[in-house]
Image (cartoon, grey):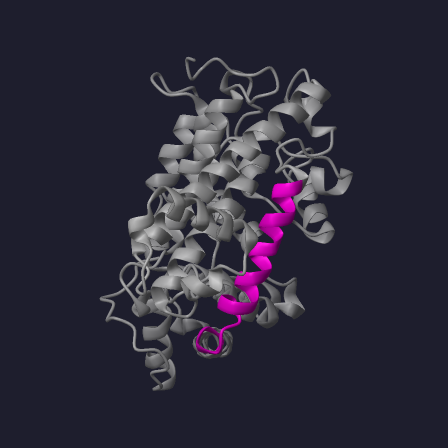
Amino acid sequence: MHKWTLADAACDPARSRGRRYPEPDAPTRTAFQRDRDRIVHSTAFRRLVYKTQVFLNHEGDLFRTRLTHSLEVAQLGRSIARSLQLNEDLVEAIALAHDLGHTPFGHAGQDALNECMAAWGGFEHNLQSLRVVDALEERYPQYDGINLSFETREGILKHCSLKNAQALEAQEPGGVGRRFIERTQPSLEAQLCNLADEIAYNAHDIDDGVRSGLVTLEQMQEVPLFHSFCEQTLRDHPQLAGPQPSRRLLFEAIRRMLSQQVYDVIDASRTAVETARPTDVDAVRQLSPLIAFSDEMRAQSTDLKRFLFRNLYRHPQVVQTTGLARQIVQDLFAAYLAEPTQMQAGFAARAQAAQGDAAPVARAVADYIAGMTDRFASREHERLTGQRLLALAADPGQPL
């Protein structure tokens, strides 16, 4: 199958809803290929290499980061998109950009920043990812942001509160916020990225959890989904059994689990699309979600997520480290809010231009902190407080 043989309901770059700032088409790339390239060349994308997935950057060189996670989501997404005749380039662009707004220190950093911003509208990393591509990247003389197409921006904004959606709608009538007001769905490509994200982090969190020693291969047998593929692997490769479990057993069980989840999504989604028969992407937006697991796989995946939550994300060692990370974010926010000139020049200038209005000052502080890598945030915290809470590698500086 040629990759440009698209399903009727797929997003066609030739029929894109366009960019916020109109531009002539690129001579050698489609709109979505251009989006992907702009994302890859953005500063925010490079920062992801030093942003936490589950384990902080200093805890091991081989643990996933936000960058490697995004690459894995893109790979899974493209594989599924090809089978469903969806637009692979759009899926890749959304996948690579979906975490651009994540704070340092993973969800601990996001939760801390959300608490700090409670009086000024809160903080949500999906909305921040949109802010990055719409406003915070400074690469082009004509506009702020990187001026992505509507379809990519729609996919980046996975979640949005009604209040924030209404604010977006006021700024951009009929734009990416409207579906949260009207309770409609995004494109099939956007739906696919949401599910590829879940498949990717469940699988690599097993790998990283076992690698860290916080979860054992024996414990993983409690999860029926993983256990079945572990048993299947041992039947096919009995030499992997033994008192010291082989890492090859872990890798092969994860590979088989990943493959089965991908095949399940393809089969279940193909059936849903064939039943609903949407004629175009606008029809997709009026239907219930069509890209999904089967009921059985959804239940098994949910069981796996619950296991990881209990045994990995809430492990005392992880909780202790993330507690320190939360303190770093909270202390940084308080320090910059009290003395905005401590931020780098562009953010300090934004705060000064607010002329005493607390809300834009706080938002400038949140934007500054959200753009930090783990090690830059730790280094800044030590500079401002004299405390070294996390022994992260030295960072020569982070231009923002």
* Residue 214 in view here: yes
Q: Position of residue 163 (x, y in %)?
A: 72, 53
Q: Is residue 15 above or below residue 240?
A: above
Q: Which residue lies furthest to the right in this view?
A: 182
Q: Which of 88 and 344 is in front in this view?
A: 88
Q: What residue sits 54% from the left and 61% below the top? A: 222
Q: Quadrant of the N terminus?
A: top left
Residue 52 lies left or right of residue 126; in this view the side is: left
Main SS of residues in magenta:
helix
The picture quadrant where one finds residue 400 is bottom left
Image side of residue 228 versus residue 173, left or right: left
Decide whether residue 305 is among the magenta residues.
yes
List x then y, in percent, for residue 245: 33, 60
- Residue 381 in the figure: left or right of residue 83: left
Describe residue 276's horizontal placement relative to residue 308 as left or right: right
Q: Is residue 143 visible?
A: no
Q: Nearer the viewer, residue 61 or 251?
A: 251
Where's residue 23, x and y in %?
45, 25
Magenta-drawn segment: 296-319
- Residue 341: percent from left, percent from top: 41, 72
Does 75 sit above or below residue 369?
Answer: above
Residue at the image position 22 percent from the left and 66 percent from the top = 396
Find residue 360 and report its image quarter.
bottom right
